[in-house]
Image (cartoon, grey):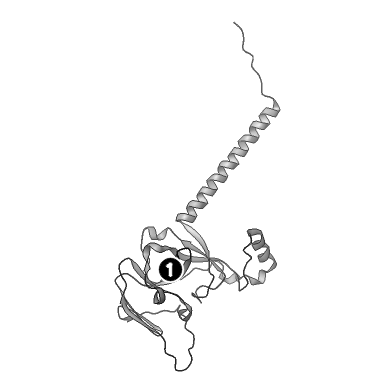
Amino acid sequence: MREQEVRTPSPQAVAASDTKSVLREYAEALIIAILLALVIRAFVVQAFKIPSGSMLQTLEIGDHILVNKFLYFFTNPERGDVIVFKFPQDESRDFIKRVIGLPGETVEVRGKEVLVNGVALREPYAVYEDLPAGMARERWGPQVVPPDRLFVMGDNRDHSMDSRVWGFLEIPKVKGKAFMIYFSIRGEQIPSTGIIQGVAYVLFHPSSIRWSRIGSLIH
């Protein structure tokens, strides 16, 4: 019987095989990380930047926030929630406002007072500016919030385009609840040309960072 020859792989072949294994492991880990990031962004948490002052003083221009997208799979928005949603008049844009009126409730605005079912809300977050003498504040409603709709307002009441202007918000357009400020920068805008430029800008302008706001919960 003829014996079969047993060949030992050369060191070069073993090294090449090990390299391929390591590269494959890195590639698999990278793919898994990307898939997890996409799933988290789509269904769990997403980051947004505040571009306007409609939610002052709760949120300032330059605040970067995290939004819980998972919460409303199990429950509906509640009064007082700060929510991000698709702007009804242009769904390519995201807006952020506070929930004031829920489906079936009667909402009325009388100047600085907001009434729900005839009872004035206590709103420590609401901001109003001083109007010129003789200028009256707006009145809105009363109107009943339709089923599957919300009445939302910005905290900066004199500078917010909200349900008083464009009407009730459909609940399915809600993306999630804002819950934390993870980064905040003053009036200067971080360059949008790329991540490297943004990081460089922050490193060379540390005084522009609002350190005290980082990690703040949104109420």
Q: Position of residue 83 (x, y in %)?
A: 44, 67
* Direction top: furthest residue: 1
Query: As drawn, is 14 to the left or to the right of 182?
Result: right
Q: Position of residue 158 (x, y in %)?
A: 47, 81
Q: Residue at x 56, y 67 (%)?
A: 214
Query: As drawn, is 101 to the left or to the right of 55?
Result: left
Picture quadrant where residue 140 is located? bottom left
* Direction front: furthest residue: 89
Query: As drawn, is 2 to the left or to the right of 181?
Result: right
Q: Residue at x 46, y 56 (%)?
A: 44
Give the crowd class for mark 1: few <14, some 14-19, many >=20 residues within 10 Å: few
Q: Position of residue 215 (x, y in %)?
A: 54, 66
Q: Residue at x 59, y 38 (%)?
A: 24
Picture quadrant where residue 43 is located? bottom left
Q: Position of residue 201 (x, y in %)?
A: 67, 65
Pointer 1: what residue? 89
Q: How many marks?
A: 1
Q: Secondary structure at mark 1?
A: loop
Please state, as top left, top right, bottom left or bottom right, where the N terminus lies in the image: top right
Query: As drawn, is 147 to the left or to the right of 156?
Result: left
Q: Residue at x 66, y 24 (%)?
A: 9
The one nearer the camera, 100 or 138, is 138
Classify 9 as above or below 192: above
Callout 1 amino acid: Gln
Classify 190 as above or below 20: below
The one nearer the camera, 91 or 158, is 91
Picture quadrant where residue 187 is located? bottom right
